[in-house]
């Protein structure tokens, strides 16, 4: 009986240890491969704001004041490009007779595609965001709005709590 109990305890410990190893390995593998496709990934950094209560961080946000990126670019020669991204949620996008609600929209700057090497299927990644009210769509979003049509040059209307914007699809 004693040997059965010891064997079961050893098998249970081995199973728990292997499960923990696999979970930790899977987590570490995911974290190390996240956004791994960007060409200059070792030189891309994200600013983060930490809120502390005493010595303990209670909240962490990728949110900073609006001018910190350009100030860092001016003050530190190591900073080559800066891009700010803002998420707007619960927007309505209108194209011709389609009206899609609860859309998430990221607003960014032209330098975004100089920093991140996302594959651009249509349009020029260097100039597609240079003008005001120009938008680039993901492939899935372009299909949702335009089906199999080429979206470049088409106008969409974005309704948000900040107002109404007419935008040209450039990529």
Image (spheres, rainbow, N blue to C red):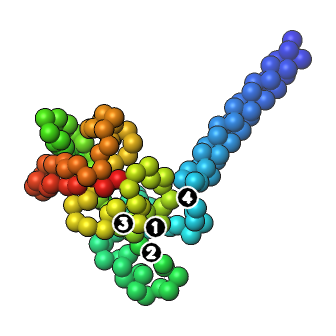
Residue 114 can be seen in this image:
yes
Q: Is there CB contact under 8 Å for labels 3 and 4?
A: no
Residue beneath disc 2: 81
Q: CA distance from mark 1 to mark 4?
A: 11 Å
Residue beneath disc 3: 127
Q: Earlier in the sequence, mark 4 or mark 2?
A: 4
Q: Is there CB contact under 8 Å for labels 1 and 4?
A: no
Q: Earlier in the sequence, mark 3 or mark 2?
A: 2
Q: Earlier in the sequence, mark 2 or mark 1?
A: 2
Q: Residues within 10 Å of mark 1 (few under 14, many from 20)?
A: some
Q: Earlier in the sequence, mark 3 or mark 1?
A: 1
Disc 4 on helix, strand or loop? loop
Q: Earlier in the sequence, mark 1 or mark 4?
A: 4
Please provide percent x and percent y for residue 93. Answer: 19, 43
Q: Residues within 10 Å of mark 2 (few under 14, many from 20)?
A: some
Residue beneath disc 4: 38
Please provide percent x and percent y for residue 50. Answer: 41, 65
Residue 57 appears left or right of 144:
right
């Amino acid at each position: 009986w004693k040997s059965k109990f010891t064997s079961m305890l050893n098998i249970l410990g081995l199973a728990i240890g292997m499960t923990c190893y696999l979970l930790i390995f899977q987590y570490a593998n995911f974290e190390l491969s996240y956004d791994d496709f960007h060409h200059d990934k070792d030189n891309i950094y994200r600013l983060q704001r930490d809120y502390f209560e005493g010595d303990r961080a209670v909240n962490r946000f990728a949110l900073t004041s609006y001018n910190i990126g350009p100030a860092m670019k001016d003050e530190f020669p190591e900073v080559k490009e800066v891009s700010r991204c803002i998420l707007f949620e619960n927007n309505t996008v209108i194209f011709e007779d389609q009206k899609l609600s609860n859309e998430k929209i990221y607003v960014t700057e032209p330098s975004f595609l100089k920093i991140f090497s996302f594959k651009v299927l249509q349009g020029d990644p260097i100039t597609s965001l240079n003008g005001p009210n120009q938008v680039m769509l993901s492939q899935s979003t372009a299909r949702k709005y335009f089906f199999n049509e080429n979206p470049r040059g088409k106008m969409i209307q974005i309704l948000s709590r900040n107002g109404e914007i007419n935008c040209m699809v450039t990529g």
